[in-house]
Image (cartoon, grey):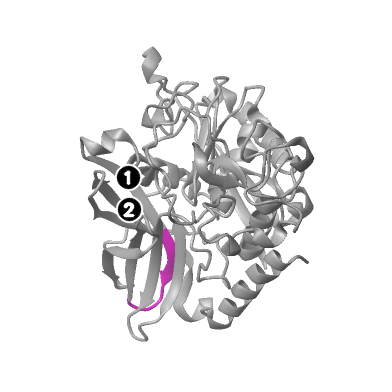
Amino acid sequence: MNRLIFIFFAVINLSLLSQTKYEDYFFDKVLRIDYIHSGNLTDEEFVIKELSEEPFWGGSKTKLIDNFNYGKYLVQVVDKKSKSVIYSRNYSTLFSEWQTTGEAKVIKKAFEETVTIPFPKQPVTVKIFARTRKHDLKIKFEYNFEPGNYFVRKDKSRFFPYTKIAGERDPAKSVDIAILAEGYTKEQITQFRDDCKRFSEYLFNSTPYKENRNKFNIYAIESVSEEAGADIPAENIWKNTALNSSYYSLNLERYLMTESYWKVRDAAAAVPYDQIYILVNSDKYGGGSIFNYYNVCINKNRFEEYVFVHEFGHGFSFLADEYYDSQTTYEDFYDINTEPLEPNLTTLVDFNKKWKALVKESTPIPTPSEEKYKDKVGAFEGGGYVAKNIFRPRIDCSMNSISVDNYCPVCVDAIRLMIDFYTE
């Protein structure tokens, strides 16, 4: 086992000594908190909308404290009696991406967001923190929850039918993926089930998912739409679909997302889940993903396998895009004077905390993009949507180019660690 993996495991294993005992603090169900997240480039506000109870907790019952320090936001649950943190998860949102666009400089905008936590047995305080450009955590939202609160809705979710596509593992010891139908009509649901089986095999074609196949449960949620397809605003195409997906999200043609996040969560609640994947019935190239938020892929495109696995790298393991020649609408997405939180990018500000241990002594840092280093781990300039000052681990990777079963060793390690976090 290389030094990098050993360090990661050591940190995580030490943290487990202080993990909360699930049954002491939580019921085996979900407290869902819907809120509005609004603001602009410099300001943001969290306003609570509604509380609801959902029946299936799909997360780990032993790894309740998240130690990865990924994502833009952190939700913490603090036991009011002991003042100790009994649950936490990191995540990012569409709002946090929108904040990096030029539009956020001139207008304010509001987004639907949700956090889900195990349903507390005792009074707790739910806190949401946001990370600064330097990754410091600043508290943005705080809510005191009493388990006897009779305003917690129990009738909110209209459960869609579902089919189990893969896996027979205890949800508390597996990675549970809910694949949601989007743009599939009632007559196309059989096609959706078949698509889910095909796309599940796409996931298991790639290392390290293929080696950990038995640690996944995958569900197909039949969220039927009135019309097939997705919105394409620039072409004046508008479809009546279950989840309101749309191309041109953040004004980028291929970015296929939805701002109707509460509908997404409503549909996913039919099963225990850790990850949400929206499968869109469209042949137009597109997709998207945000860490611990949701993933999106199209179902009828020649690059569909690549898109499916590439986007899951973002949503599941917080892997960054390693390409640098893309016309994205992001501005200054990374601070070149700070190490990115994503495991597969570095600014070399503190390379010792990234994948330096995987680099052979004969490999120069930075590493020239030359044929002799083609399959070597190094620090190759270009990544995170910019050509200079940000470095990726290998010349090529599934997070860089349109390629299948091509995660670099750094990405493979990051995915394995996340699989273990959910399943061990």
* Visible residue check, residue 195: no
Where is mark 2, residue-wise? Answer: 34
**Left or right placement of residue 165 versus residue 40 in this view:** right
Please tell me whether mark 2 sits on a helix, a strand or a loop. Answer: strand
Do the CB atoms of the residues marked 1 and 2 lie less than 8 Å apart?
yes
User: Amino acid under label 2?
Assistant: Asp
* Above/below status of 220 relative to 298: below
User: Amino acid under label 1?
Assistant: Glu
| Residue 99 % position (x, y) | 32, 43
Where is mark 1, residue-wise? Answer: 112
**Which circle, 1 or 2, is nearer the viewer?**
1
* Above/below status of 30 relative to 231: below
How many C-alpha atoms fall within 10 Å of the one at disc 2: few (<14), some, or many (≥20)? many
* Above/below status of 150 relative to 280: below
In the foreground, 423 or 401: 401
* Visible residue check, residue 327: yes
Which residue sits at x=41%, y=54%? 72
Q: Quadrant of the N terminus?
A: bottom right
How many C-alpha atoms fall within 10 Å of the one at disc 1: few (<14), some, or many (≥20)? some
| Residue 18 % position (x, y) | 53, 82
In the foreground, 212 or 186: 212
Bounds of the magenta segment:
116-123
Residue 211's disc is none
In the foreground, 367 or 46: 367
Image quadrant assignment for residue 102: top left
* Above/below status of 304 relative to 389: above
Examine the residues drawn in magenta and state their main secondary structure: strand
Q: Indicate yes or no whether the magenta region holds residue 118.
A: yes
**Left or right placement of residue 238 versus residue 177 in this view:** left
**Left or right placement of residue 102 versus residue 356 in this view:** left
